[in-house]
Image (cartoon, rainbow, N blue to C red):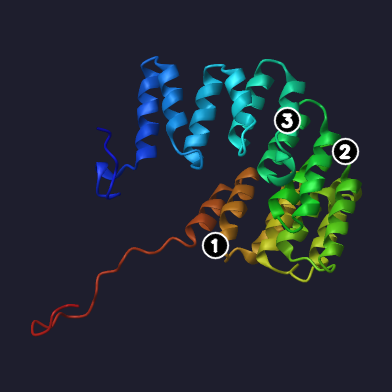
Amino acid sequence: MEHRCSDFPWCCNGHDRDTAIGHLAQIRERQGRTDEAIALLRTASTTLVNNQKQLAALLARHGRLDELRATAATDDPRYAVQQLASLLEERGDVEGAIAAYRQAHGLVAYDPNSAFELAQLLARHGRGNEAIDVMRLQADARNGDDWILHTLADLCLAQGRPEDGLAHLDALAAARGGEEYWELYWIRLSLIAARDGVDEAIAQARSHPEGATWYVATHIAELLADAGRTAEAVAVLDPHAHAPAISHDLAGYLIDLGRIEEAVAVLHQDTPRPPQPSTTAWNEEEPPF
């Protein structure tokens, strides 16, 4: 009679049924019993992410294209589509890989991670403008998600379209009322530098309400260092050297300049001192604590 876990996590050594199935499927695959491993995973809960990912990866490893396609046609196709697209791309079927994302129940529209994967796939194969369109839709739908805006900006930069990236960011900022905290504003700096030059990007960074802070200084220093102006990057960070988050970047720039001793001093400035022996005499009538 099949055992059913009745007192998780105390029963079955802390493994629920689906976790146990996952482990057993790994064993079956290593034994070369692939069909049994697939059958096992299909009996597990289809709502658990780990089971979905494991099944999709197993099908891809063994080139089971038809089964991957069938899994990608289910209600939650994310992981199957990812594996299917990857397998098709490896086999040289780029159009098939792109179609896998576009045909999966509107997956790219509602899942930003799948949209990102599609954009990267398009960019890898010289279709950067299409990649920008994919991420622009995500940025419009999720205005304020910084990682989406970073991806959009990077794609525009890679395609030599910094002005378009800035126009997108300006429109999205206007939809938020025109004011941006630095965590979103700094995304535009590399685009400004590409369009108008590093000095203009630095000027705009310094004109931001948070422009005098140490974290803005790190971004200004990065712009300067990327432009080969490392000594200026050090000069920007020096006034903020007391900030622990600055030390690693500052030391790195100093090392690039061959100023090793200064770099070591910067890295050691926050190192706690070892405990010093007490000079107070111990009173035997009271414990030393």
10 Å crowding of disc 1: few (<14), some (14-19), many (20+) = few
Name the residue type under label 3.
Leu
Q: Which residue is mark 2?
A: 160
Residue 65, position in %: x, y?
A: 61, 18
Locate residue 2: give its quadrant.
top left
In which quadrant of the rendered image does the N terminus lie?
top left
Name the residue type under label 1.
Pro
Q: CA distance from mark 3 to mark 1?
A: 38 Å
Locate residue 247: give its quadrant.
bottom right
SS for dot 2: loop
Residue at x 41% of width, y 20% of height: 36
| Residue 283 shows in the view | yes
Residue at x 56% of width, y 52% of height: 263
SS for dot 1: helix
Mark 3 vs 1, N-terminal side: 3
Q: CA distance from mark 2 to mark 3?
A: 18 Å
Q: CA distance from mark 1 to mark 2?
A: 36 Å
Residue at x 81% of width, y 53% of height: 140
Mark closer to the observer (2, 3): 3
Mark closer to the observer (3, 1): 3
Mark 2 vs 3, N-terminal side: 3
Marks 1 & 2, CB-CB < 8 Å contact: no
Which mark is on residue 244? 1
Name the residue type under label 2.
Gly
Locate residue 215: give its quadrant.
bottom right
Q: Which residue is mark 3?
A: 121
In which quadrant of the rendered image does the C terminus lie?
bottom left
Q: Nearer the viewer, residue 113 or 206?
A: 113
